[in-house]
Image (tube, rainbow, N blue to C red):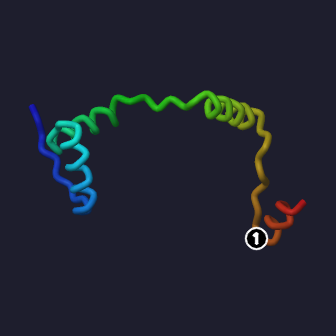
Amino acid sequence: MTSQVVFKIDSKLKRAAQSQAKASGLTLSEWYKQATESFLTAPEIPNAKTARSLKSALKDVKLGRNFSPSFDNIDDMIAHLEK
């Protein structure tokens, strides 16, 4: 079973998408179907540098370190940043 999806996009964007689809030997409909499938199936895997950074940040969260204090006013925040 298939369903129809209707949405509005800028005419310039549509023409660019049609051009790219045509260059790939696809209709715009086929191109959108492939884009939707790719969006749903592609896992988002960070590169090695980002993965290390995320791991370090999660460790800091667990240990409660590297957090800025909360501020009641802008002057206190600026004073904290300047020291």
Q: Which x, y percent locates residue 32? A: 22, 42
**Residue 68 placement, left or right of 33:** right
Q: Nearer the viewer, residue 65 or 28?
A: 28
| Residue 54 to residue 19: above or below | above
- Res 4 quadrant in image: top left
**Residue 69 placement, left or right of 40:** right
Classify the position of the N terminus by image quarter.
top left
- Total numbered circles: 1
Q: Nearer the viewer, residue 77 or 27?
A: 27
Residue at point 76%, 70% (across, down):
73
User: Helix, strand or loop at disc 1?
Assistant: helix
Residue at point 86%, 66% (across, down):
79
Q: Which x, y percent locates residue 34? A: 24, 35
Residue at point 22%, 56% (across, down):
15
Classify the position of the C terminus by image quarter.
bottom right
**Amino acid at dot 1:** Ile
Residue at point 61%, 27% (across, down):
48
- Res 72 quadrant in image: bottom right
Q: Residue furthest front?
A: 23
Badge 1 crowding class, 10 Å Cα cut-off, few under 14, some 14 to 19, many 20 or more, is: few
- Res 52 quadrant in image: top right
Residue bearing mark 1: 74
Q: Nearer the viewer, residue 15 or 10?
A: 15
Q: Residue furthest right?
A: 83
Q: Nearer the viewer, residue 43 or 12?
A: 12
Q: Which x, y percent locates residue 39? A: 34, 36
| Residue 27 to residue 48: above or below | below
**Residue 13 placement, left or right of 71:** left
| Residue 80 to residue 3: above or below | below
